[in-house]
Amino acid sequence: MAGGITGSGTTFDLPNYTGELFQVTPNETPLLSIIGGLTGGKEVHSTQIEWQEFDLRKRSDRQKKEGQDAPAGEGRKRSNVTNVLQIHQEAVGVSYTKQAATGQKSGLNIDAQNPVQDELGWQITQELKQIAGDVEYSFINGTYQLPTDNTKERKTRGLLQAIATNKIAAAGKLLSLEMFGNICQMAYDNGGIAEGDTATVIVNSTQKRALSWIFSKGGTQSQPDSRNYFGVNLQTIETDFGKLNIMLSRDMPADSLAVASLEHLEASFLAIPGKGHFFAEPLAKTGASDKVQVYGEIGLEYGNEKAHAKITGLSTDLSALFNPPVVPAG
């Protein structure tokens, strides 16, 4: 059974095998991929990020009479929103012997080549995948922390915590068409999900099944369509508020879903001079091995939180949805 190690890899704890190499752990990062990945997004020069909001007055009948004096001056206030960048720092190490002994094989030791000929490079690639997964998780589930000293880590505020206005606590109820419509209406009424290409439901596997069921009328109508957006395949559904993408995410909690306006989301990176955003660099020599650290600082800019919405506390037992109780006639 595959697993991880701590410290520098050697020929003893990183044995070579032959045959095709399969990754058994999923590593999709749909939200991070759509907003730029580990190399896209916006470059900043502070560990904190800030953006601004303003609103317009409520629409009303404000007609003026002919010849009337100019009305009193008015203006609109602006307010700020902040988040922080969090540090992702990992390291891999491989002994000289392990890097050289590419022909030393375990397992059946059949007459075939070990597919990993550059052990250090392969380990760095896997570490970058793992960091991308950690960022994806934080961008959805992160809990904000801005330390006052260096005894604690900076933690970026994730999308679920950021959504404070448009929210429904399901209290263990099954997802329903009415509940889903209510949360979409909250987002729409507050200015969200107005752009068809970016209006997106972020959902896990459990609530994806529930969503597909209620929109196909219990499986009797056609399933959702699909579209490709920035390289991520998204299904779509028609709602009272236009066509919404469905983003299937392994990192959304099983009892939750979010309705997001993706045009408001952006990844912010601290640009390290001479190195860039996320990078790998060799560390000082301490023996007969190479050690490389992978480093980057990243945070989520989520724009206007009122443009998004969420449902939390949904039932994860879908049996009653698929097999509703039969009501006796009469």
Image (spheres, rainbow, N blue to C red):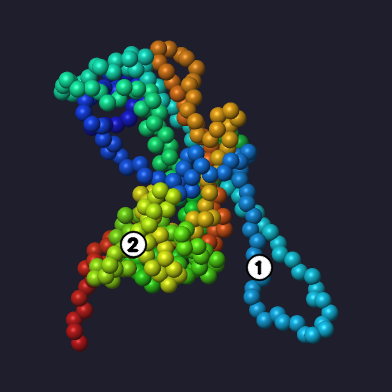
Q: Amino acid at mark 1?
A: Leu
Labels in figure, total: 2
Q: Residue tagged by mark 1? A: 56
Q: CA distance from mark 1 to mark 2?
A: 36 Å
Q: Where does the N terminus fall, quadrant-wise?
A: top left
Q: Earlier in the sequence, mark 1 or mark 2?
A: 1
Q: In the image, which is nearer the foreground, mark 1 or mark 2?
A: 2
Q: Is residue 289 left or right of residue 190?
A: left
Q: Residue shown at 48%/21% (left/top)?
A: 282
In the figure, is residue 67 to the left or right of 229?
Answer: right
User: Residue 175, which numbered label?
Assistant: none
Label 2: state its secondary structure.
Answer: strand
Rendering coords of residue 300 (x, y %): 53, 47
The structure residue drawn at horizontal position 35% and vertical position 59%, both measured from the top left corner, is 226
Give how far across and how far down residue 198 sits, in percent. Answer: 47, 58
Among the 4 quarters of the image, the one containing residue 324 = bottom left
Residue drawn at 38 percent across, 68 percent down: 238
Which residue position is annotated with label 2?
225
The percent coordinates of residue 207 (x first, y second) are 33, 59
In the depicted structure, whether residue 36 falls above or below residue 211? above
Q: Is residue 257 visible?
A: no
Tell me if residue 279 comes above or below residue 206 in the rendering: above
Q: Residue furthest bottom?
A: 330
Is the residue 42 above or below the residue 323 in the image? Answer: above
Residue found at x 47% / y 28%: 280
Q: Amino acid at mark 2?
A: Asp
